[in-house]
Image (spheres, rainbow, N blue to C red):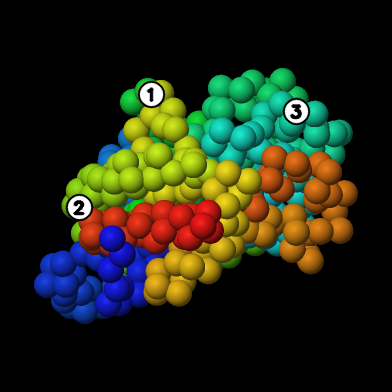
Amino acid sequence: MMEKVTKPIYVTQPALPPLEEFTDLLKEIWDSKIITNNGPFHQQFEHALAAYLGVKHISVFSNGTLALITALQVLRITGEVITTPFSFVATTHSLWWNNIKPVFSDIEPDYFNLDPEKVEAAITPQTTAIMPVHVYGNPCNLERFQQIADTYGLKLIYDAAHAFGVKVNGNSVLNYGDLSILSFHATKVFNTIEGGAIVSPDAQTKKRIDYLKNFGFAGETTVIAPGINAKMNEIQAAYGLLQLKSIDQIIEKRKRISDLYRVHLKDIRGISFLNPAEGVDYNFAYFPILIDSSQFGPSRDMVYDELKKHDIFPRRYFYPLISQFPTYKGLASASPDNLPVAEEITKKILCLPIYPDLEEKSVLNICAIINTLKEKHAQ
């Protein structure tokens, strides 16, 4: 039974730390008058993050896009980089800002990540790196990508914006490849309002990252490289420390919502969702469904529009493909003929609302609206 929505339901809503605890930390910042430049909260946050995530070295940034841009500088990437068209535009923009040519490769149909076999076929003498994305927090084929990178002498940079806390067989997904990049944007499972990070394998690489994110300064009067200003400030870092205290509860709440959707949508013909992979600890960052109009009746966009009429705002992540944007559509690799799986998925995908404070009755209401639309269409 459908109920009237009393306030808009968006695809996500940020989890916020207790205001009184945040206020206490703000008082410390006000008293110290240290608000940026690798202050005490910044240092505490990096240590706490590394411990929680199970990684050796992490450098926090003011946002995830600057982390991506800097990661490419750290590894001195040039030429061409093979990446996915099925992601947020920042993935490819980071290449463009580094004067690197993006080469789009198709995705696999099970988890919508880059297809390693298609990537291997796209390698040319100009290829210097591969940049896969753990889409919706689903881990890529880690062993196969490493094998390809080793065989062809390529760098492997993971866009792990969706993969905070995700583990494969007990090991953080962030420990794979040459670098992994996180986003702490307000829409993410773990947020610092804005923010991001680079996970690196050794202390020397972290040192270079930290130089580059602070204009290239290696001392008061020494600049070793043309760096950028991408430092996380003390307010974001303090906020992040508080978020870490509740992140396990946040993920558990997201799991309950995901399970609820699965129960109430599993018998609707024409709707499918991703099956969990064995050995993966998920963060339940998104709840994507595929709508096959040949079986469901209404199209994906009809479902999207119907939910919006009820003040419910899902998102078509990711539609359109990055390869369809004017900036990139002229690339030979952006041709729809080169990306048949991605082209199919982008027309069917819909991410339903999921966040810790989403009420069970709202989830049931969303499922009821979807089911009612199908029934009306069948009449």
- Between discs 1 and 2, the one toward the N terminus: 2
Q: Quadrant of residue 179?
A: top right
Kindly state the secondary structure of the residue where label 3 is placed.
helix
Disc 2 residue type (three-letter): Ser
Question: On residue 279, which mark appears?
Answer: 1
Disc 1 residue type (three-letter): Gly
**Label 1 – label 3 distance at C-alpha:** 26 Å
Q: Choose between 115 and 273: the one closer to the eye.
A: 273
Q: Look at the image and tell me whether residue 95 can be seen.
A: yes
Which residue position holds label 2? 246
Kindly state the secondary structure of the residue where label 1 is placed.
loop
Residue 289: image x %, image y %? 49, 47
Residue at horizontal 71 percent and vertical 26 percent from the top: 117
Disc 3 residue type (three-letter): Glu
Residue at horizontal 45 percent and vertical 67 percent from the top: 307
**Label 1 – label 2 distance at C-alpha:** 24 Å
Which residue position holds label 3? 120
Kindly report which numbered mark, 1 or 2, lies closer to the viewer in this rendering.
Answer: 1
